[in-house]
Image: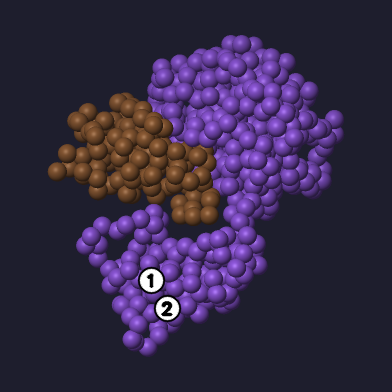
Chain colours: A purple, B brown
Amino acid sequence: MTANRSESVTIIVPCGSLGAGVREEEIEYGLRKGAQAIATDAGSTDSGAAYLAQGKSKNSRGAVKRDLTILMKAHAKSGIPVIIGTSGQAGGDLNVNWTRDILLEINAELGLSPKIALLYSEIDGAQLKQLNRAGQVTPLPPLGPLEDKTIDECDHIVALMGVEPYLKALDEGADVIIGGRSTDPAVLASFPIWKGAGWGASWHAGKIGECGVQCSENPTLGSGVLLTVGQDGFEVEPLSANNRCSPYSVSAHMLYENTNPYLLTEPGGQLDATDATYDQLDDNRAVKVAGAVWKPGQYTMKLEGAGGGLYQTIMLVGIQDPDVLQDVGGFHDRFLDALYTRAKHGLPEEEHDHFHISLRMYGWNAVDGGPVPEGTPAPRELGVLFVATARTQDLANAIAHTCNPYFFHYPAVMDKELPSYGFAFSPADVPRGQVFEFKLNHVVALDDPLQLVRFNWINA
Amino acid sequence: MTRLSDATRHIRTKQAGPFWVTMDIWFKDEDSYTRYHDCPALSAETFARVYGTNADFVKRIPMPEFNLVKISYPRATPQGGMIERDMHSGQQYARLLDIELD
Protein backbone atom coordinates (compact mmCIF):
# COMPACT_ATOMS: atom_id res chain seq x y z
CA MET A 1 0.00 0.00 0.00
CA THR A 2 2.60 2.53 -1.05
CA ALA A 3 1.34 6.04 -1.76
CA ASN A 4 2.02 8.01 -4.88
CA ARG A 5 5.69 8.97 -4.66
CA SER A 6 5.02 12.61 -5.38
CA GLU A 7 2.82 12.94 -2.30
CA SER A 8 4.17 13.92 1.06
CA VAL A 9 3.37 12.10 4.29
CA THR A 10 2.26 13.95 7.42
CA ILE A 11 2.63 12.60 10.94
CA ILE A 12 1.90 13.96 14.39
CA VAL A 13 4.67 13.58 16.95
CA PRO A 14 2.53 14.31 20.01
CA CYS A 15 5.32 14.48 22.62
CA GLY A 16 8.95 13.67 23.35
CA SER A 17 7.99 10.66 25.42
CA LEU A 18 4.58 9.07 26.02
CA GLY A 19 3.39 10.20 29.44
CA ALA A 20 5.12 13.59 29.24
CA GLY A 21 1.83 15.41 28.66
CA VAL A 22 0.11 15.17 25.25
CA ARG A 23 -2.16 18.15 24.54
CA GLU A 24 -5.57 17.45 23.06
CA GLU A 25 -5.71 20.74 21.14
CA GLU A 26 -2.35 19.95 19.51
CA ILE A 27 -3.64 16.59 18.28
CA GLU A 28 -6.74 18.38 16.91
CA TYR A 29 -4.47 20.78 15.04
CA GLY A 30 -2.44 17.93 13.56
CA LEU A 31 -5.59 16.10 12.42
CA ARG A 32 -6.90 19.27 10.78
CA LYS A 33 -3.59 19.52 8.90
CA GLY A 34 -4.25 16.07 7.45
CA ALA A 35 -1.99 13.89 9.61
CA GLN A 36 -1.90 10.27 8.46
CA ALA A 37 -0.36 8.74 11.60
CA ILE A 38 0.64 9.51 15.17
CA ALA A 39 4.08 8.31 16.27
CA THR A 40 6.13 8.79 19.42
CA ASP A 41 8.66 7.00 21.53
CA ALA A 42 8.01 6.29 25.17
CA GLY A 43 11.46 6.16 26.67
CA SER A 44 15.23 6.16 26.37
CA THR A 45 18.33 5.20 28.33
CA ASP A 46 18.80 8.75 29.62
CA SER A 47 17.46 8.20 33.09
CA GLY A 48 19.64 5.23 33.85
CA ALA A 49 19.66 1.46 33.83
CA ALA A 50 17.06 0.80 36.54
CA TYR A 51 14.14 0.86 34.10
CA LEU A 52 15.54 -1.84 31.83
CA ALA A 53 16.98 -3.91 34.69
CA GLN A 54 13.68 -3.87 36.58
CA GLY A 55 11.30 -3.75 33.61
CA LYS A 56 9.63 -0.67 35.08
CA SER A 57 8.42 2.58 33.56
CA LYS A 58 9.74 5.98 34.59
CA ASN A 59 6.55 7.82 33.68
CA SER A 60 3.64 6.96 35.96
CA ARG A 61 0.86 4.62 34.86
CA GLY A 62 -1.66 7.45 35.20
CA ALA A 63 0.34 9.81 32.98
CA VAL A 64 0.87 7.17 30.27
CA LYS A 65 -2.80 6.19 30.37
CA ARG A 66 -3.85 9.82 30.08
CA ASP A 67 -1.65 10.44 27.02
CA LEU A 68 -2.49 7.16 25.34
CA THR A 69 -6.21 7.80 25.88
CA ILE A 70 -5.94 11.07 23.95
CA LEU A 71 -4.12 9.27 21.12
CA MET A 72 -6.67 6.44 21.02
CA LYS A 73 -9.54 8.93 20.87
CA ALA A 74 -7.80 10.56 17.91
CA HIS A 75 -7.44 7.12 16.33
CA ALA A 76 -11.13 6.36 16.91
CA LYS A 77 -12.10 9.64 15.29
CA SER A 78 -9.75 9.58 12.30
CA GLY A 79 -8.78 5.95 11.79
CA ILE A 80 -5.07 6.80 11.54
CA PRO A 81 -2.46 4.45 13.07
CA VAL A 82 -0.87 5.07 16.46
CA ILE A 83 2.77 4.00 16.68
CA ILE A 84 4.59 3.80 20.03
CA GLY A 85 8.26 2.82 20.32
CA THR A 86 10.53 2.02 23.27
CA SER A 87 7.41 1.35 25.30
CA GLY A 88 7.47 1.65 29.08
CA GLN A 89 10.77 3.61 29.17
CA ALA A 90 13.19 0.77 28.40
CA GLY A 91 11.36 -1.28 25.75
CA GLY A 92 12.04 -4.68 27.35
CA ASP A 93 9.32 -7.35 27.24
CA LEU A 94 8.00 -6.35 30.69
CA ASN A 95 7.89 -2.69 29.63
CA VAL A 96 5.98 -3.60 26.43
CA ASN A 97 3.47 -5.73 28.33
CA TRP A 98 2.92 -2.98 30.91
CA THR A 99 2.04 -0.59 28.07
CA ARG A 100 -0.12 -3.24 26.35
CA ASP A 101 -2.19 -3.68 29.51
CA ILE A 102 -2.80 0.07 29.76
CA LEU A 103 -3.83 0.13 26.09
CA LEU A 104 -6.28 -2.75 26.59
CA GLU A 105 -7.82 -0.99 29.58
CA ILE A 106 -8.28 2.18 27.50
CA ASN A 107 -9.78 0.24 24.60
CA ALA A 108 -12.28 -1.42 26.94
CA GLU A 109 -13.25 1.98 28.37
CA LEU A 110 -13.64 3.56 24.94
CA GLY A 111 -15.28 0.51 23.37
CA LEU A 112 -12.53 0.11 20.74
CA SER A 113 -11.03 -3.06 19.28
CA PRO A 114 -8.17 -1.95 17.05
CA LYS A 115 -5.75 -4.41 15.50
CA ILE A 116 -2.69 -4.22 17.76
CA ALA A 117 0.85 -5.31 16.89
CA LEU A 118 3.27 -5.91 19.77
CA LEU A 119 6.93 -5.84 18.75
CA TYR A 120 9.38 -7.48 21.16
CA SER A 121 13.14 -7.14 20.84
CA GLU A 122 14.35 -8.49 24.16
CA ILE A 123 16.85 -11.32 23.80
CA ASP A 124 18.10 -13.74 26.40
CA GLY A 125 21.66 -14.29 27.52
CA ALA A 126 22.00 -17.70 25.84
CA GLN A 127 20.91 -16.24 22.50
CA LEU A 128 23.42 -13.39 22.82
CA LYS A 129 26.24 -15.76 23.78
CA GLN A 130 25.51 -17.74 20.62
CA LEU A 131 25.58 -14.60 18.43
CA ASN A 132 28.80 -13.55 20.15
CA ARG A 133 30.45 -16.92 19.54
CA ALA A 134 29.39 -16.70 15.89
CA GLY A 135 31.39 -13.46 15.62
CA GLN A 136 28.33 -11.26 15.03
CA VAL A 137 28.87 -9.00 18.08
CA THR A 138 31.25 -6.01 17.93
CA PRO A 139 32.11 -3.63 20.79
CA LEU A 140 31.71 0.13 20.53
CA PRO A 141 34.31 2.29 22.30
CA PRO A 142 35.12 2.60 25.16
CA LEU A 143 34.19 -1.06 25.81
CA GLY A 144 36.11 -4.13 24.66
CA PRO A 145 35.04 -7.55 23.33
CA LEU A 146 31.95 -9.05 24.95
CA GLU A 147 32.52 -11.74 27.57
CA ASP A 148 30.01 -14.30 28.82
CA LYS A 149 30.50 -12.97 32.34
CA THR A 150 29.21 -9.53 31.27
CA ILE A 151 26.16 -11.12 29.62
CA ASP A 152 25.45 -13.01 32.85
CA GLU A 153 25.45 -9.72 34.79
CA CYS A 154 22.51 -8.41 32.73
CA ASP A 155 18.97 -8.85 34.07
CA HIS A 156 17.47 -7.79 30.72
CA ILE A 157 18.97 -7.32 27.24
CA VAL A 158 17.31 -5.56 24.31
CA ALA A 159 18.30 -5.02 20.69
CA LEU A 160 17.34 -1.64 19.22
CA MET A 161 14.91 -2.05 16.33
CA GLY A 162 15.05 -0.04 13.13
CA VAL A 163 12.10 0.61 10.83
CA GLU A 164 11.70 -2.92 9.44
CA PRO A 165 9.56 -4.46 12.22
CA TYR A 166 7.28 -1.40 12.06
CA LEU A 167 7.01 -1.70 8.25
CA LYS A 168 5.97 -5.34 8.63
CA ALA A 169 3.36 -4.46 11.26
CA LEU A 170 1.95 -1.72 8.99
CA ASP A 171 1.97 -4.11 6.00
CA GLU A 172 -0.16 -6.50 8.03
CA GLY A 173 -2.69 -3.82 8.88
CA ALA A 174 -1.82 -2.75 12.42
CA ASP A 175 -3.96 0.09 13.80
CA VAL A 176 -1.78 0.41 16.89
CA ILE A 177 1.85 -0.64 17.27
CA ILE A 178 3.34 -1.07 20.73
CA GLY A 179 7.04 -1.41 20.01
CA GLY A 180 9.84 -2.54 22.29
CA ARG A 181 13.23 -0.85 22.30
CA SER A 182 13.81 0.99 19.05
CA THR A 183 16.05 3.81 17.97
CA ASP A 184 14.18 7.08 18.51
CA PRO A 185 14.26 8.16 14.83
CA ALA A 186 13.07 4.71 13.63
CA VAL A 187 9.73 5.05 15.43
CA LEU A 188 8.99 8.27 13.55
CA ALA A 189 10.64 7.33 10.23
CA SER A 190 8.77 4.06 9.79
CA PHE A 191 5.37 5.42 8.69
CA PRO A 192 6.72 7.94 6.12
CA ILE A 193 9.00 5.23 4.69
CA TRP A 194 6.07 2.80 4.54
CA LYS A 195 4.05 5.39 2.61
CA GLY A 196 6.86 5.88 0.11
CA ALA A 197 8.71 8.98 1.39
CA GLY A 198 12.48 9.17 0.91
CA TRP A 199 14.62 7.18 3.35
CA GLY A 200 17.05 10.06 3.98
CA ALA A 201 14.21 12.52 4.48
CA SER A 202 12.30 10.12 6.74
CA TRP A 203 15.27 9.23 8.97
CA HIS A 204 16.29 12.88 9.24
CA ALA A 205 12.72 13.89 10.11
CA GLY A 206 12.73 11.13 12.72
CA LYS A 207 15.90 12.45 14.31
CA ILE A 208 14.65 16.06 14.39
CA GLY A 209 11.25 15.07 15.79
CA GLU A 210 12.48 12.52 18.34
CA CYS A 211 12.03 14.84 21.35
CA GLY A 212 8.79 16.43 20.12
CA VAL A 213 8.70 20.17 20.72
CA GLN A 214 12.37 20.30 21.77
CA CYS A 215 13.40 21.27 18.21
CA SER A 216 11.33 24.47 18.47
CA GLU A 217 12.30 27.94 19.65
CA ASN A 218 10.41 27.59 22.94
CA PRO A 219 9.95 24.00 24.13
CA THR A 220 7.89 25.17 27.14
CA LEU A 221 5.09 26.31 24.81
CA GLY A 222 3.81 22.92 23.77
CA SER A 223 4.40 19.22 23.50
CA GLY A 224 4.65 18.03 19.91
CA VAL A 225 5.53 18.73 16.30
CA LEU A 226 4.09 17.99 12.89
CA LEU A 227 6.39 16.37 10.31
CA THR A 228 5.57 16.46 6.61
CA VAL A 229 7.97 14.20 4.77
CA GLY A 230 8.56 14.09 1.03
CA GLN A 231 11.14 12.50 -1.26
CA ASP A 232 14.15 14.73 -0.60
CA GLY A 233 13.24 16.62 2.51
CA PHE A 234 10.67 17.42 5.14
CA GLU A 235 8.95 20.26 6.94
CA VAL A 236 8.67 20.55 10.69
CA GLU A 237 6.39 22.85 12.67
CA PRO A 238 5.30 22.96 16.31
CA LEU A 239 1.77 21.78 17.06
CA SER A 240 1.09 24.83 19.25
CA ALA A 241 0.04 27.99 17.41
CA ASN A 242 2.05 30.33 19.65
CA ASN A 243 5.38 28.56 19.10
CA ARG A 244 7.70 28.37 16.10
CA CYS A 245 10.60 26.39 14.68
CA SER A 246 13.59 28.26 13.31
CA PRO A 247 16.47 26.99 11.17
CA TYR A 248 18.63 27.39 14.28
CA SER A 249 16.32 25.50 16.67
CA VAL A 250 15.92 22.64 14.18
CA SER A 251 19.53 22.27 13.09
CA ALA A 252 20.82 22.61 16.67
CA HIS A 253 18.76 19.56 17.64
CA MET A 254 21.25 17.43 15.69
CA LEU A 255 23.74 18.20 18.48
CA TYR A 256 21.56 16.82 21.23
CA GLU A 257 22.78 13.77 23.18
CA ASN A 258 24.83 12.82 20.20
CA THR A 259 28.61 12.65 19.68
CA ASN A 260 28.39 13.22 15.92
CA PRO A 261 25.78 15.72 14.68
CA TYR A 262 26.30 14.91 10.99
CA LEU A 263 26.39 11.12 10.86
CA LEU A 264 23.92 8.84 12.61
CA THR A 265 24.42 5.10 12.51
CA GLU A 266 21.07 3.35 12.44
CA PRO A 267 19.98 -0.24 11.83
CA GLY A 268 20.76 -0.97 8.18
CA GLY A 269 22.65 2.18 7.32
CA GLN A 270 23.84 5.63 8.12
CA LEU A 271 22.08 8.99 7.89
CA ASP A 272 24.46 11.59 6.51
CA ALA A 273 23.18 15.09 7.27
CA THR A 274 26.44 16.87 6.40
CA ASP A 275 24.92 18.72 3.45
CA ALA A 276 21.48 19.28 4.94
CA THR A 277 19.90 22.72 4.51
CA TYR A 278 17.49 24.39 6.93
CA ASP A 279 15.23 27.19 5.65
CA GLN A 280 12.41 29.14 7.28
CA LEU A 281 9.09 28.93 5.46
CA ASP A 282 6.97 32.04 4.79
CA ASP A 283 4.70 31.42 7.76
CA ASN A 284 7.75 32.00 9.99
CA ARG A 285 6.89 28.95 12.12
CA ALA A 286 7.79 25.94 9.96
CA VAL A 287 11.24 24.96 8.70
CA LYS A 288 12.01 23.13 5.47
CA VAL A 289 14.90 20.67 5.77
CA ALA A 290 16.49 18.97 2.77
CA GLY A 291 19.64 17.26 1.61
CA ALA A 292 20.26 14.46 4.13
CA VAL A 293 21.24 11.16 2.55
CA TRP A 294 20.55 7.59 3.68
CA LYS A 295 23.51 5.29 2.99
CA PRO A 296 22.51 1.64 3.28
CA GLY A 297 25.06 -0.65 4.93
CA GLN A 298 25.48 -3.77 7.01
CA TYR A 299 22.37 -4.41 9.10
CA THR A 300 23.28 -3.91 12.77
CA MET A 301 21.25 -3.58 15.94
CA LYS A 302 22.70 -1.89 18.99
CA LEU A 303 22.43 -3.85 22.22
CA GLU A 304 21.53 -2.58 25.66
CA GLY A 305 21.85 -4.70 28.75
CA ALA A 306 21.27 -3.69 32.33
CA GLY A 307 21.74 -5.40 35.64
CA GLY A 308 21.50 -4.73 39.34
CA GLY A 309 24.54 -5.11 41.59
CA LEU A 310 25.24 -3.85 45.09
CA TYR A 311 22.69 -2.24 47.44
CA GLN A 312 22.65 1.25 48.93
CA THR A 313 21.24 3.03 51.97
CA ILE A 314 21.37 6.80 52.28
CA MET A 315 21.07 9.47 55.02
CA LEU A 316 21.00 13.24 54.72
CA VAL A 317 21.88 16.00 57.19
CA GLY A 318 21.94 19.77 56.88
CA ILE A 319 24.78 21.64 58.62
CA GLN A 320 25.11 25.34 59.47
CA ASP A 321 27.69 24.85 62.27
CA PRO A 322 30.42 27.49 61.61
CA ASP A 323 33.19 25.13 62.79
CA VAL A 324 32.28 22.73 59.97
CA LEU A 325 31.81 25.41 57.33
CA GLN A 326 35.23 27.01 57.78
CA ASP A 327 37.08 23.80 56.80
CA VAL A 328 34.72 21.63 54.77
CA GLY A 329 37.50 19.66 53.06
CA GLY A 330 39.29 18.71 56.28
CA PHE A 331 36.00 17.94 58.00
CA HIS A 332 34.96 15.65 55.13
CA ASP A 333 38.17 13.62 55.34
CA ARG A 334 38.06 13.16 59.14
CA PHE A 335 34.30 12.46 59.06
CA LEU A 336 34.66 9.77 56.39
CA ASP A 337 37.54 8.08 58.26
CA ALA A 338 35.53 8.00 61.46
CA LEU A 339 32.49 6.52 59.68
CA TYR A 340 34.59 3.77 58.04
CA THR A 341 36.08 2.81 61.40
CA ARG A 342 32.66 2.82 63.04
CA ALA A 343 31.09 0.77 60.19
CA LYS A 344 33.76 -1.93 60.47
CA HIS A 345 32.96 -2.37 64.15
CA GLY A 346 29.40 -3.21 63.25
CA LEU A 347 30.06 -5.50 60.27
CA PRO A 348 31.15 -9.15 60.12
CA GLU A 349 34.85 -9.52 59.22
CA GLU A 350 34.08 -11.09 55.79
CA GLU A 351 32.26 -7.92 54.67
CA HIS A 352 35.14 -5.55 55.48
CA ASP A 353 36.47 -5.58 51.91
CA HIS A 354 33.02 -5.42 50.31
CA PHE A 355 31.44 -2.20 51.44
CA HIS A 356 31.83 1.46 50.52
CA ILE A 357 30.84 4.73 52.12
CA SER A 358 30.84 8.09 50.44
CA LEU A 359 29.92 11.53 51.75
CA ARG A 360 28.72 14.02 49.16
CA MET A 361 29.09 17.59 50.44
CA TYR A 362 26.23 19.47 48.75
CA GLY A 363 27.03 23.19 48.75
CA TRP A 364 30.74 22.45 48.41
CA ASN A 365 31.86 19.79 45.90
CA ALA A 366 29.17 17.08 45.77
CA VAL A 367 28.75 17.10 41.98
CA ASP A 368 32.38 16.26 41.18
CA GLY A 369 33.86 15.15 44.52
CA GLY A 370 37.12 16.80 43.51
CA PRO A 371 39.40 19.44 45.02
CA VAL A 372 37.97 22.94 45.54
CA PRO A 373 40.06 25.92 44.37
CA GLU A 374 42.13 27.75 47.04
CA GLY A 375 40.30 30.72 48.47
CA THR A 376 36.75 29.41 47.82
CA PRO A 377 34.58 31.15 50.41
CA ALA A 378 32.83 29.09 53.08
CA PRO A 379 29.26 28.17 52.15
CA ARG A 380 26.33 29.33 54.30
CA GLU A 381 25.27 25.74 54.89
CA LEU A 382 26.01 22.23 53.73
CA GLY A 383 23.90 19.24 52.83
CA VAL A 384 25.79 16.04 53.53
CA LEU A 385 24.55 12.92 51.79
CA PHE A 386 25.78 9.65 53.28
CA VAL A 387 25.79 6.74 50.82
CA ALA A 388 26.56 3.23 52.10
CA THR A 389 27.00 0.49 49.49
CA ALA A 390 27.13 -3.22 50.37
CA ARG A 391 26.34 -6.72 49.10
CA THR A 392 22.79 -6.85 50.47
CA GLN A 393 20.18 -4.31 51.48
CA ASP A 394 20.36 -5.58 55.06
CA LEU A 395 24.10 -4.95 55.17
CA ALA A 396 23.75 -1.45 53.68
CA ASN A 397 21.02 -0.72 56.24
CA ALA A 398 23.20 -2.08 59.04
CA ILE A 399 26.06 0.23 58.03
CA ALA A 400 23.72 3.22 58.13
CA HIS A 401 22.33 2.18 61.52
CA THR A 402 25.80 1.71 62.97
CA CYS A 403 26.98 5.05 61.57
CA ASN A 404 23.83 6.97 62.50
CA PRO A 405 25.08 8.41 65.85
CA TYR A 406 28.39 9.52 64.31
CA PHE A 407 26.70 10.96 61.25
CA PHE A 408 24.41 12.90 63.58
CA HIS A 409 27.03 14.15 66.08
CA TYR A 410 30.56 13.96 64.60
CA PRO A 411 32.30 17.20 65.70
CA ALA A 412 34.54 19.50 63.68
CA VAL A 413 36.35 20.55 66.85
CA MET A 414 37.04 17.81 69.37
CA ASP A 415 37.07 19.70 72.67
CA LYS A 416 33.66 21.35 72.31
CA GLU A 417 30.26 19.93 73.20
CA LEU A 418 29.00 17.49 70.54
CA PRO A 419 26.95 19.15 67.80
CA SER A 420 23.70 17.66 66.46
CA TYR A 421 23.21 18.07 62.74
CA GLY A 422 19.89 18.58 61.00
CA PHE A 423 18.29 15.31 59.95
CA ALA A 424 15.51 15.79 57.43
CA PHE A 425 13.67 12.53 58.10
CA SER A 426 12.75 9.97 60.71
CA PRO A 427 13.78 7.22 60.37
CA ALA A 428 16.94 8.93 59.15
CA ASP A 429 18.07 6.14 56.83
CA VAL A 430 16.49 5.42 53.45
CA PRO A 431 17.06 1.97 51.92
CA ARG A 432 17.60 2.83 48.25
CA GLY A 433 17.68 -0.59 46.64
CA GLN A 434 20.17 -1.82 44.07
CA VAL A 435 22.72 0.05 42.00
CA PHE A 436 21.78 -0.51 38.36
CA GLU A 437 24.24 -0.24 35.49
CA PHE A 438 24.27 -0.60 31.74
CA LYS A 439 26.68 -3.38 30.86
CA LEU A 440 26.66 -3.49 27.06
CA ASN A 441 27.83 -1.06 24.40
CA HIS A 442 27.92 -3.46 21.47
CA VAL A 443 26.24 -4.04 18.13
CA VAL A 444 25.09 -7.30 16.58
CA ALA A 445 25.34 -7.79 12.80
CA LEU A 446 22.40 -9.60 11.20
CA ASP A 447 21.35 -10.71 7.71
CA ASP A 448 17.67 -10.54 8.58
CA PRO A 449 16.33 -7.37 10.30
CA LEU A 450 13.53 -9.43 11.84
CA GLN A 451 15.71 -12.25 13.20
CA LEU A 452 15.69 -10.96 16.79
CA VAL A 453 12.16 -9.53 16.73
CA ARG A 454 9.03 -11.33 17.94
CA PHE A 455 5.53 -10.27 16.86
CA ASN A 456 2.32 -10.67 18.79
CA TRP A 457 -1.11 -9.64 17.58
CA ILE A 458 -4.31 -8.67 19.38
CA ASN A 459 -7.67 -8.49 17.53
CA ALA A 460 -5.88 -9.78 14.41
CA MET B 1 43.84 36.29 30.10
CA THR B 2 40.60 34.90 28.71
CA ARG B 3 38.64 32.23 30.54
CA LEU B 4 36.33 29.83 28.70
CA SER B 5 33.30 31.52 30.26
CA ASP B 6 34.49 34.88 28.82
CA ALA B 7 34.79 33.57 25.26
CA THR B 8 31.48 31.69 25.06
CA ARG B 9 27.79 32.41 25.14
CA HIS B 10 26.68 28.93 26.18
CA ILE B 11 28.21 25.63 27.22
CA ARG B 12 26.36 22.42 28.02
CA THR B 13 27.12 18.80 28.74
CA LYS B 14 24.77 15.83 28.44
CA GLN B 15 25.08 12.07 28.28
CA ALA B 16 25.30 10.58 24.80
CA GLY B 17 24.31 7.06 25.78
CA PRO B 18 25.39 5.49 29.08
CA PHE B 19 29.11 5.52 28.28
CA TRP B 20 29.73 8.95 26.73
CA VAL B 21 29.44 12.61 27.62
CA THR B 22 29.14 15.25 24.93
CA MET B 23 29.99 18.92 25.45
CA ASP B 24 28.74 21.69 23.17
CA ILE B 25 30.74 24.92 23.41
CA TRP B 26 29.10 27.91 21.67
CA PHE B 27 31.60 30.73 21.23
CA LYS B 28 30.43 34.34 21.47
CA ASP B 29 31.21 35.15 17.85
CA GLU B 30 33.22 34.06 14.86
CA ASP B 31 36.39 35.71 16.16
CA SER B 32 36.26 33.84 19.46
CA TYR B 33 35.46 30.60 17.63
CA THR B 34 38.37 30.99 15.22
CA ARG B 35 40.78 31.94 17.95
CA TYR B 36 39.90 29.38 20.62
CA HIS B 37 37.94 26.38 19.31
CA ASP B 38 41.05 24.24 18.89
CA CYS B 39 43.35 25.93 21.42
CA PRO B 40 45.59 23.77 23.64
CA ALA B 41 43.47 24.50 26.71
CA LEU B 42 40.63 22.51 25.07
CA SER B 43 42.84 19.61 24.05
CA ALA B 44 42.13 15.93 24.61
CA GLU B 45 44.77 16.04 27.35
CA THR B 46 42.77 18.67 29.23
CA PHE B 47 39.70 16.44 29.09
CA ALA B 48 41.78 13.47 30.27
CA ARG B 49 43.06 15.52 33.23
CA VAL B 50 39.78 17.15 34.25
CA TYR B 51 37.41 14.23 33.61
CA GLY B 52 39.67 11.22 34.16
CA THR B 53 38.99 9.96 30.64
CA ASN B 54 41.32 8.40 28.05
CA ALA B 55 42.69 11.14 25.78
CA ASP B 56 42.84 8.71 22.82
CA PHE B 57 39.03 8.42 22.77
CA VAL B 58 38.21 12.14 22.91
CA LYS B 59 36.27 13.18 19.77
CA ARG B 60 36.17 16.73 18.48
CA ILE B 61 33.84 18.09 15.81
CA PRO B 62 34.16 21.76 14.85
CA MET B 63 30.89 23.28 13.61
CA PRO B 64 31.70 26.72 12.22
CA GLU B 65 28.08 27.23 11.12
CA PHE B 66 27.22 27.54 14.85
CA ASN B 67 30.57 29.00 16.06
CA LEU B 68 30.59 25.80 18.09
CA VAL B 69 32.92 22.95 18.88
CA LYS B 70 31.50 19.62 20.04
CA ILE B 71 33.82 17.59 22.23
CA SER B 72 32.83 14.11 23.42
CA TYR B 73 34.58 11.79 25.84
CA PRO B 74 33.90 8.46 27.54
CA ARG B 75 32.69 8.66 31.14
CA ALA B 76 35.32 7.67 33.71
CA THR B 77 32.66 5.33 35.15
CA PRO B 78 29.50 4.20 33.34
CA GLN B 79 26.23 6.00 34.10
CA GLY B 80 24.57 5.08 37.36
CA GLY B 81 27.39 3.24 39.13
CA MET B 82 28.09 3.11 42.85
CA ILE B 83 29.75 6.53 42.97
CA GLU B 84 27.48 8.31 40.48
CA ARG B 85 27.11 12.03 41.20
CA ASP B 86 25.66 13.37 37.94
CA MET B 87 23.38 10.79 36.29
CA HIS B 88 22.75 12.79 33.09
CA SER B 89 26.21 14.44 33.03
CA GLY B 90 24.39 17.77 32.81
CA GLN B 91 26.70 19.55 35.29
CA GLN B 92 30.04 18.38 33.93
CA TYR B 93 30.71 21.54 31.92
CA ALA B 94 30.99 23.70 35.05
CA ARG B 95 34.50 22.51 35.84
CA LEU B 96 35.80 24.00 32.57
CA LEU B 97 34.27 27.47 32.93
CA ASP B 98 37.32 29.00 34.58
CA ILE B 99 39.90 27.33 32.39
CA GLU B 100 42.30 29.85 30.84
CA LEU B 101 42.40 29.84 27.05
CA ASP B 102 45.36 32.18 26.58
- Packing grade of label 2 (10 A; few <14, some 14-19, many >=20) is some
Residue sitting farthest toward the right: A459
Specify the label residue A233 is tagged with. none
Q: Tell me the CA gap for discs 2 and 1.
A: 9 Å
Instruction: Determine the residue positioned at 45% across, 65% down.
Output: A359
Of residue B93 and residue B58, the one placed in the foreground of this image is B58
Q: Chain of mark 1?
A: A
Asked where in the image residue A94 lies, by quadrant, the reply is: top right
User: Is A352 positioned to the left or the right of A219 in the image?
Assistant: right
Q: Position of residue B35 (x, y in %)?
A: 20, 31
Asked where in the image residue A268 lies, by quadrant, the reply is: top right
Which amino acid type is marked by label 2?
Tyr
Name the residue tied to disc 1: A334
Q: Position of residue B15 (x, y in %)?
A: 47, 41
The answer to whether A203 is drawn above or below residue A312 in the figure is above
CB under 8 Å between discs 2 and 1: yes
Q: Earlier in the sequence, mark 2 or mark 1?
A: 1
Residue sitting farthest toward the bottom: A417
Q: Chain of mark 2?
A: A
Q: Name the front one of labels 2 and 1.
A: 1
Which amino acid type is marked by label 1?
Arg
Of residue A210 and residue B100, the one placed in the foreground of this image is B100
User: Is A323 positioned to the left or the right of A1 in the image?
Assistant: left
Name the residue tied to disc 2: A410
Q: Secondary structure at mark 1?
A: helix
Is residue A106 something one can see in this rendering?
no
The answer to whether B98 is drawn above or below residue B27 in the figure is below
- Packing grade of label 1 (10 A; few <14, some 14-19, many >=20) is few
